[in-house]
Image (tube, grey):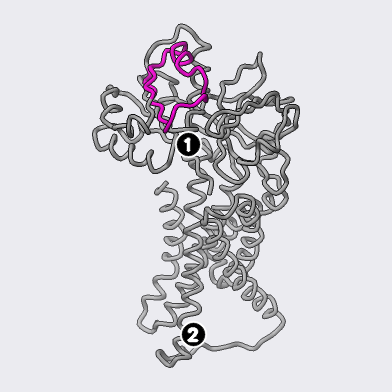
Amino acid sequence: MKRPLLLLALLPFGVWAMFVFPDLLTDDKGFWDWRRALIILSGILALWWMSAGMVLATRPAWLERRFGGLDKLYRLHKDIGIGAGLLVFTHWMMEWLPKNLVKLGWIERGNRPRGPRGEPDMWIDLAKDVGEWAGYILLALVVIALVKRIPYRWFRLVHKAFGLIFIGGAFHGLMLMPKSFWGQPLGGLTAAVAAAGVIAALLSLSNRIGRQRQYPARIETIRHHDGNVLEIVCRPQSGWPGHRAGQFLFANFGQAAEGAHPFTIASAWQPQDGTLTLAIKALGDFTAKLPELLQAGQALTLEGPYGKFDFSDNGAAHAAQQVWIAGGIGVTPFLARLDQLAAKPPAQANTDFFYCTPQDADYPDQLEARCRQAGVRLHRRLTDRDGMLDPAEIQACLKPGSSVWFCGPAQWGKSLADKLTSQGLPKTAFHREAFEFR
């Protein structure tokens, strides 16, 4: 993820420096000249980053393939959003702070000539006002988006507002860009980047994101399991393209305020059966209410499939020995893979599966039998009784060419990745689903 962020910073900075630095390095340029140049630079960088974030929010399939799945694409989207917020704050501080230091008498005001005011200034003044308020609102929205205690429905509405704020920011940035920039590559590139962001913002505001990958479905059956797990079998009505084990989808149960939520598909796709299974654990306000809201026969909308957590090593599915590690409801992608392997006998015992939960529960049912049928060695661990999984147990199962597939709590996954890669496992051999969308 560091490379695209670095490119997104260095490309506009490099083009800017190519044409602006030579003039700034002359002897007659002082503090106020540098301040103005850096204000413009921070504004251009913020515009590029916000535009990139808007484009990623549209879930483009070609970028999903490029970055290894929508979960990783959204993580990049989140990092870009935080970076854009910091750039907007920097842009605002470089504008606001020197002015107030002048008022306090701590620094001298620069001599900046002012031309006559005419009709064109109406648009300049409007761009300044729009940019100022868009910046304030953007910073507030970034903070709200990062506070996980805020319910998802409010987070969703806040996220939707980013599109409108971006359009205001793009208007501000392009109107106030120095005229000399329009004769340079930076002007044209910035306009093109802003146009891409505006198109993405309009798609978001008109609720068109993901529409081409949406399919009507009905709930066939609902089962309640221990540990507040709801197992839902859905039947797509038409058009569902099928999915690979490990992929996820967005499910919209018709709650307008909530919209669509992401869930991993807990079953392999069998065209002759035509159903798919979702296993949803009550981890928030909405998922806790689902047992009261849902019933068999109810309509829903499925969007997907998404994700590259598909158990393939360098394009060859299950070609080498694998180690799976799941925590709690993180078992769902592995259930789909078990179904897939069991459907293609004879299965070979080429996989070790570590499944960790605090206590024994009735979900998933018949896990031992499903693993035997799929040729997978199950290592069941009840952490309340047996303690946490020791990375040495995983290490003992690894062979040259092995890969590790993890789905569970994010911090646990990061800790395991650090320990295993420090002991010789290639970083590219540790696959972790980044299933955090805010």
Q: Position of residue 276 (x, y in %)?
A: 63, 24
Q: Position of residue 210 (x, y in %)?
A: 66, 40
The furthest residue to the bottom? 105
**Magenta region:** 351-380
Seen in the picture, residue 235 relative to 69 is either above or below; the reply is: above
Based on the picture, tell me whether residue 379 belongs to the magenta stretch: yes
Q: Which structural element holds mark 2?
A: helix
Q: Amino acid at mark 2?
A: Lys
Foreground: 32 or 379? 379
Foreground: 115 or 217? 217
Foreground: 341 or 187? 341
Relative to 4, is 244 on the left or the right?
right
Residue assigned mark 1: 68
Q: Amino acid at mark 1?
A: Gly
Residue found at x 48% / y 39%: 67
Residue 49 appears anywhere in the view: yes
Which mark sits nearer the N-terminus, 1 or 2?
A: 1
Callout 2 environment at 10 Å: few (<14), some (14 to 19), or many (20+)? some
Callout 1 environment at 10 Å: few (<14), some (14 to 19), or many (20+)? few
Residue assigned mark 2: 99
Q: Position of residue 140 (x, y in %)?
A: 56, 65
Residue found at x 53% / y 45%: 437
Seen in the picture, residue 1 relative to 309 is either above or below; the reply is: below
Residue found at x 54% / y 42%: 283
Q: Which structural element holds mark 1?
A: loop
User: Where on the picture, by quarter, is residue 395?
Assistant: top left
Residue found at x 37% / y 29%: 404
Relative to 36, is 382 on the left or the right?
left
The furthest residue to the front? 385
Q: CA distance from mark 1 to mark 2?
A: 46 Å
